[in-house]
Image (cartoon, rainbow, N blue to C red):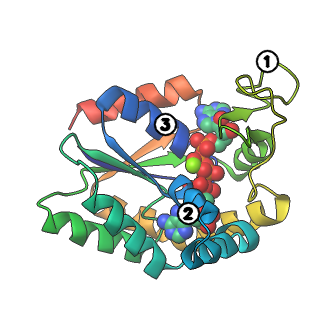
Amino acid sequence: MNLIIVGPQASGKGTQAKLLVQKLGLAYFEAGDILREKTKENSLIGKEIDLWMNQKGKLVPDKIMVQVVAEWLDRTDLSKGVIFDGFPRVVDQYLFLRDLLKKKGLRIDRAIYLKISRSICWKRLRARRICPKCDREFNLITRPPKTDELCDDCQVGLVQRQDDTPELIKRRLKTYEEVTKPLVTLVSKEGILVEIDGEKTVEKVQQDILKHLKKI
Ligand code: AP5
Ligand code: MG
């Protein structure tokens, strides 16, 4: 089964995709994490990605994204299926991915759309914390660390994600409305959209997704 998971910032794409990967054994393309890893490399492409995602809070240009995805697909075992989280995010990226998969004899079976309100996006993003040492994620409201703002594993002080500042959250949400919403409309017309209420608990959202996938 080949899936994409789409939704506004903090709708739970990463949280839900990771659970699906554990349960279904899918290969996992996590656009944001793959890009963040690249910013740690001392390369030209890494510096360009850092500029777009962490300083401007804008989408990384398509020419970089398609290269990153094509390389990843070439080195990944897709035999058990795959879930794309954070990619595609615009109509052109979707058309590119659809063509690339078609060449491999594959297709996107479903697009899971996690629907949440703007106010919940803000609340969740402002409460997200990351361990700078091991990258483990916490949320001060829903998944708090055992000790005040320290990583449970490393005991290192937690930090916010670089793009979780009010200014960049505002910009990311605006981009979502402008360029990702049209993608949701397109996949809906194509009949592959599964709309899920992303405001329920993590466990309930996961159950709702699995219920839909069983019907495939
Ligand atoms: P990316 O890392 O994908 O960030 P995003 O889209 O802003 O989404 P998030 O990762 O913030 O949210 P999420 O939906 O994964 O939610 P999560 O599970 O973490 O992309 C970052 C940047 O990279 C982009 O801005 C862009 O610059 C670049 N980029 C990425 N893809 C690109 C592309 N295709 N093209 C161009 N550029 C691209 O959950 C969020 C929080 O909420 C967590 O704290 C979690 O614990 C909590 N939470 C989750 N579910 C629930 C729940 N049900 N109830 C309560 N809390 C919950
Ligand atoms: Mg994510």
For the point 81% across and 37% down, the residue is: 158
Examine the image and state in which quarter residue 17 appears. Answer: top left
Residue 124: numbered disc: none
How many residues crowd mark 1 within 10 Å: few (<14), some (14–19), many (20+)? Answer: few
**Up-down relation of residue 214 to residue 127 (above or below):** above
Q: Give the residue pinned by disc 1.
A: 146
How many residues crowd mark 2 within 10 Å: few (<14), some (14–19), many (20+)? Answer: some
Q: In this view, does 97 lie to the left or right of 167?
A: left
Q: What amino acid does circle 3 point to?
A: Gln
How many residues crowd mark 3 within 10 Å: few (<14), some (14–19), many (20+)? Answer: some
Residue 16: numbered disc: 3
Examine the image and state in which quarter residue 44 appears. Answer: bottom right
Examine the image and state in which quarter residue 91 appears. Answer: bottom left
Q: What amino acid does circle 1 point to?
A: Lys
Q: Residue furthest left?
A: 105
For the point 79% across and 18% down, the residue is: 146
Q: Give the residue pinned by disc 2.
A: 38
For the point 22% across and 72% down, the residue is: 99
Please tell me which of labels 3 and 1 falls first in the chain.
Answer: 3
Q: Is residue 123 left or right of residue 204?
A: right
Q: What amino acid does circle 2 point to?
A: Lys
Q: Helix, strand or loop at disc 1?
A: loop
Q: Helix, strand or loop at disc 2?
A: helix
**Up-down relation of residue 198 to residue 44 (above or below):** above
Rendered location of residue 150, percent (x, y): 82, 28
For the point 58% across and 74% down, the residue is: 43
How far is mark 3 from mark 2, CA to CA? 23 Å
Q: Does the residue labelled 3 lie within 8 Å of ligand 1?
A: yes
